Image (cartoon, grey):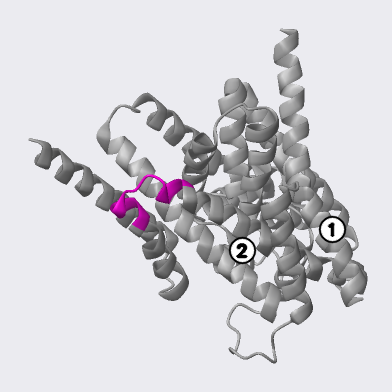
């Protein structure tokens, strides 16, 4: 029992910490979860994290909150998921309540603008670091089909501006066809 | 139907429809809270996006808190936020449990591997947008050397080097780049 409670407290604190620093979009959460859950506590592997990130992204809603829920669930079941979600929405809730009262002053503050401009570069570096590792995990499998999916979805989204939901649906269909094809070949 | 419930259902709808996250969902939120319900003005919505960029947390959660507070106080903010995240959490958990219980199936394995590849591509796309924002100030820049922000490029390179070589914590990187921004841009 005592161990459970300690785990819950750790989950709450970890998610609170992660959420309070999620500047520049939900993807920053992935390296943070990796640092705390995979690196420090070894609750699950890098591969598990990628599975969770893929699911968090393929379902509706905020990626950061979805990933928190999944990591919490993996560590401590449904209570873990609930605690993690609560901790993930608490910082934005509190900060926005505060900002909402003074938002005119906040928007025109040059000090905040300078800090944020600096952070943009930091976020960009974090994301490049993250995708480098993600790509190497995928390419290591030496599957042409899976490796080709990366540039294809990138081009579909970045160059052709195709809706994310559509990209994911097409990807699922292609995978099912691919699995069928592989089965046929074996028989 | 009272305001709190209306907030809950509107943001439930926003949460359910926002796949992929990020800035792609801005028009969707705008349609619901500005045009359809008239809860907040166009100007205030633009301000929320600016504030959202300045504060941590997902855009949809920030917007739901802000709109909820403006028209339904704390109860409104809570209802809107819960509505906004509910579907995503339930669907993520369902999908995760489904993938775990059917781990042995070739189809499930293949779909999960494919989703991993596709979402890596999507994250690279988001990373490219972020790089353009950081270096050029907008995501559809004119490609020339002169409009490139050299300070940002230097900061980006230093941070990336530190991440690759020293395995520094993401939070330290964010704090350090924020402080560097204060020193370089103010």
Disc 1 and disc 2: Cα gap in Å? 41 Å
Prevalent SS, magenta region: helix
State the image coordinates of residue A116 (x, y, percent, origin top left). Answer: 80, 66
Crowding at mark 1 (Cα within 10 Å: few <14, some 14-19, many 20+):
some
Q: Residue at x 35, y 48 (%)?
A: B114
Q: Are marks 1 and 2 in contact (CB under 8 Å)?
A: no
Most foreground residue, A125 or A100: A125
- Mark 2 element type: loop
Name the residue beneath numbered marker 2: B37
State the image coordinates of residue B62 (x, y, percent, origin top left). Answer: 71, 55
Residue A90 is labelled as: none
Quarter of the image for residue B154 reads: bottom right
Q: Earlier in the sequence, mark 1 or mark 2?
A: 2
- Left or right, residue B152 beside residue A169: right
Marks 1 and 2 share the same chain: yes
- Mark 1 element type: helix
Front position among marks 1 and 2? 1
């Amino acid at each position: 029992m005592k161990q459970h409670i300690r785990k819950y407290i750790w989950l709450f604190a970890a998610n609170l910490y992660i959420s309070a620093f999620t500047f520049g979009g939900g993807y920053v959460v992935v390296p943070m979860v990796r640092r705390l859950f995979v690196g420090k506590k070894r609750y699950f592997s890098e591969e598990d994290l990628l599975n969770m990130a893929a699911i968090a992204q393929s379902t509706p809603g905020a990626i950061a909150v979805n990933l928190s829920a999944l990591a919490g669930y993996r560590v401590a079941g449904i209570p873990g998921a609930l605690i993690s979600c609560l901790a993930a929405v608490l910082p934005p809730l509190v900060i926005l309540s505060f900002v909402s009262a003074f938002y005119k002053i906040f928007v025109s503050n040059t000090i905040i603008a300078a800090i944020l401009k600096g952070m943009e570069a930091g976020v960009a570096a974090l994301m490049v670091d993250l995708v480098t590792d993600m790509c190497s995990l995928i390419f290591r499998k030496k599957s042409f089909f899976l490796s080709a999916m990366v540039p294809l979805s990138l081009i579909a989204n970045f160059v052709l501006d195709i809706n994310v939901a559509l990209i994911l649906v097409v990807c699922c269909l292609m995978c099912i066809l691919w699995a069928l094809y592989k089965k046929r070949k074996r028989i | 139907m009272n305001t709190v419930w209306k907030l809950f259902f509107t943001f439930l709808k926003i949460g359910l429809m926002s796949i992929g996250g990020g800035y792609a969902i801005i028009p969707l939120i705008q349609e619901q809270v500005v045009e359809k319900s008239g809860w907040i003005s166009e100007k205030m919505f633009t301000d929320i996006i600016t504030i959202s960029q300045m504060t941590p947390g997902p855009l949809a959660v920030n917007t739901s808190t802000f709109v909820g507070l403006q028209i339904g106080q704390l109860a409104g903010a809570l209802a809107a936020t819960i509505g906004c995240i509910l579907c995503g959490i339930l669907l993520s958990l369902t999908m995760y449990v489904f993938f775990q219980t059917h781990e042995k199936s070739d189809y499930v394995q293949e779909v999960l591997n494919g989703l991993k590849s596709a979402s890596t591509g999507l994250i690279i796309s988001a990373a490219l947008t972020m790089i353009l924002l950081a270096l050029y100030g907008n995501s559809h820049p004119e490609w020339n050397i002169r409009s490139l922000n050299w300070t940002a490029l230097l900061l980006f390179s230093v941070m990336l080097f530190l991440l690759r070589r020293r395995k520094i914590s993401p939070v330290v990187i964010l704090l350090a780049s924020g402080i560097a921004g204060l020193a370089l841009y103010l």
